[in-house]
Image: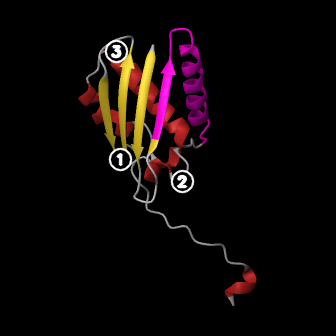
Amino acid sequence: MIRIYALVKGEQDIPLITKQFQYDNHSEEIFLAGVQMVKKRLANNLKINLNETLLFYCAYIVSELRSGKTVSTIQKNVHRLLSPDKVMIGVPESIQRIVFDVNIDNKLKETVKFEEPIQISEYILVPKIDDDEKC
């Protein structure tokens, strides 16, 4: 059984995002299939979106908790998972802080917090200028 409630805070102009992942023993295969799809996209050098990023982090948390890792270890190692070039533009800015309330396999609820899990790239979007406008 997997129950994860995620509260996501991004930059000031981005509203709070809440997401719930809930799977019983029979539907956990759906969760795992979604995670495999995201891993396949990453393996094919495709960028993942915000929802896929959250699913990827949930899978990481579940896997690490089931293998006996501590919350502090999970939080410390999250920066190794995804880099700005693996996610779509705007994702790092949208997930500057994530709080996961996790309950798996009927164990006690754990709270896992990620602070800036993906480093924010310094880029500037510039409008395209037609050749006629360059003069």
Could you tell me the amino acid type at mark 3?
Ser
Residue position marked by numbered label 2 in the rendering: 89
Q: Position of residue 41 (x, y in %)?
A: 61, 34
The mark nearer the N terminus, 1 or 2, is: 2
Q: Among all residues in the image, which is located at the extreme top? A: 26
Evaluate if marks 3 and 2 touch, with contact meaning CB atoms under 8 Å apart.
no
> Relative to 98, is 37 above or below?
above
State the residue at coordinates (75%, 85%): 132
Query: Disc 1 to disc 2, how far (Cα)?
Result: 15 Å
State the residue at coordinates (38%, 48%): 96
Magenta residue span = 18-46
Q: Which mark is residue 116?
A: 1
Q: Which mark is residue 67?
A: 3
What is the quadrant of residue 26 in the picture? top right
What is the quadrant of residue 49 in the picture? top right
Front position in the image: 83 or 113 = 113
Q: In the rendered image, which quarter contains the N terminus?
A: top left
Q: Position of residue 85 (x, y in %)?
A: 51, 48
